[in-house]
Image (cartoon, grey):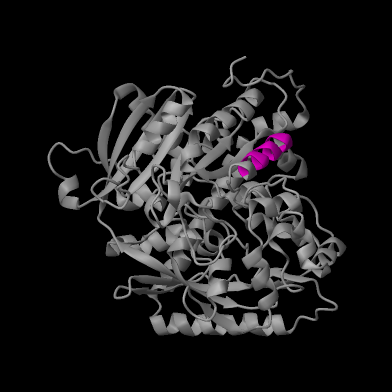
Amino acid sequence: MSDLEAPLRPKRKKIWVDYFVQFRWIIVIFVVLPISFTIYFLTYLGDVRSNCKSYKQRQEEHDENVNKVVKRLKQRNPSKDGLVCTARKPWIAVGMRNVDYKRARHFEVDLSAFRNILEIDRERMIARVEPLVNMGQISRVTVPMNLSLAVVAELDDLTVGGLINGYGIEGSSHIYGLFSDTVVAYEIVLADGRLVRATKDNEYSDLFYAIPWSQGTLGFLVAAEIKLIPIKEYMRVTYKPVVGNLKELAQGYIDSFAPRDGDQDNPEKVPDFVETMIYTPTEAVCMTGKYASKQEAKQKGNVINRQGWWFKPWFYQHAQKALKKGEFVEYIPTRDYYHRHTRCLYWEGKLILPFGDQWWFRWTLGWLMPPKVSLLKATQGEAIRNYYHEMHVIQDMLVPLYKVGEALEWTHREMEVYPIWLCPHRLFKTPVKAMISTEPGFEHHRRQGDTEYSQMYTDVGVYYTPGSVFRGEVFDGVEAVRKMEEWLIENHGFQPQYAVSELSEKSFWRMFDASLYEHCRKKYGAVGTFMSVYYKSKKGRKTEKEVQEAEQAHLETAYAEAD
């Protein structure tokens, strides 16, 4: 067996869950899709109503809601009530974790009213928004103004709060970094009820750098000021096929956005957007985008693809055409491009609705897509959830760009999942060491994509059913994720915590840096009020005793072994 050949596995006996999953599309079509569409429509009406309010009215509502949060926190009795968390139901979260920490006794604080765009400041080029504002909502407002967030995550339902406290990336992250890197200020309600504004250069600068990846365990985010950039009406997208082995596919991907002469900050050499999809171990399509004016897009001979229409082929299948027809260029309306993966949920839609990509379904029922991830989770029981954890992979591997070839080879051997999504992002040097950071000394031996102030990383997105499962073979999803996490630790990589994690506490703090996070936990009174990020991310049920004992333990003990 060659190094890249997936191992042969014994056959697996089918169980009743296999048949339920196979025919789950019935529930999706007749239950999930209609309810999803209704929720989307009602949410849209709510957004329109919010946008009709004056700035003063929205600010008054915001201040009133913040006061409610402060009042609620002060009602908590630490000796009787559980740890603090939001009142959001566990199944509403977009991530794949089961939010098991809410099964222990806890003290709920309702943040559901924080879903307004508070201000679009053209002069400062800042959007001030509340945490439950999602990507579909913000792009609907800003794009007609020829403005946009610097990083717009592809799926409509992803919220500002989730992308800040967790992880957010887009095709522009090779320029601007992760979503949290584009934030100018956070407004946080601390454990004692104080409202503070944290920026990179004020008295709360330590909190500013500690918030990303903290999963809301330092305080409640109630507003954020986020960088805006000027944009144009269309995206000029180039689809370039690449063939070869996985290392050659990786190099083709790197060359699509990282000049070999190191001129990474030159807009003439670096595209505005980048992503690559690996379809097989020998085939990939690299996509690069440049903003284009309406006048340019409508010039004679140019092809315009209004990808946002419900009947259009799913984007990943549309891009795959480049493997047969060769390199081609087209113009996509900017907002359609931002949300190109929403309708088919990347390629997960093919598993949810096996015929969802067929022309007859797209024309007749495509307007109902996509199903809300929260409703998909709400309509699956414990057995189905465990089945997906064991037989399905939804993980992102953030690795240094120069290791992307190794990551692809490892993924092929251990998981054999295709397509694979590649998206680069900068990891900036910061004055303090946050939970994730660059490799020590990277600036002294800069590699392709690196600059003096940032190291280029890449997201290796692994979302689908492994080939061994399709062939009816045994696949141990738990063990595969454990191996992935160990590989990431050994290669200075990171695992976003929206996904199912098998990390022990010791391994978690080998992957992430605890120093600034724990400093802020102590300084701002989060210990004993908010659950620690590890226990919030940990897989499995948490009893109140387990969580409370972990919170009361001497904090340095858990991390001494990781040093």
* Residue most extreme to the top: 1
92 or 147: nearer the viewer = 147
Q: Is residue 81 visible?
A: yes
Answer with left or right where residue 328 lies relative to residue 316. Answer: left
Corner quadrant of residue 233: bottom left
Q: Where is residue 307? Give x, y as percent.
A: 34, 42
Where is residue 87 shown, x and y percent of the image?
68, 68
Q: Residue furthest right?
A: 545
Left or right of residue 284, residue 493 in this image? right
Q: Nearer the viewer, residue 559 or 412?
A: 559
Q: Quadrant of the N terminus?
A: top right
Q: Furthest residue to the left?
A: 300
Q: Is residue 510 above or below residue 28?
A: below
On the question of residue 363 being in view, the answer is no
The magenta span reads 478-488
Question: Residue, x 47% and y 59% (percent of image)?
Answer: 429
- Quarter placement of the C terminus: bottom right
Up/down of 361 relative to 105, above or below: above
Q: Is residue 93 above or below residue 456?
A: below
Estimate the x, y position of residue 384 in percent, counting from the top left.
72, 40
Residue 157 magenta: no
Q: How many marks?
A: 0
Residue 482 lies within the magenta run: yes
Q: Nearer the viewer, residue 231 or 211?
A: 211
Majority secondary structure of magenta residues: helix
Q: Quadrant of residue 416?
A: top right
**Is 11 on the left or on the right of 432, as rendered?**
right
Q: Which residue lies at the image location 55% right of the left edge and 28% below the top edge?
A: 409
For the point 57% across and 76% down, which residue is it?
Answer: 188
Residue 187 placement (x, y as % from top left): 53, 76
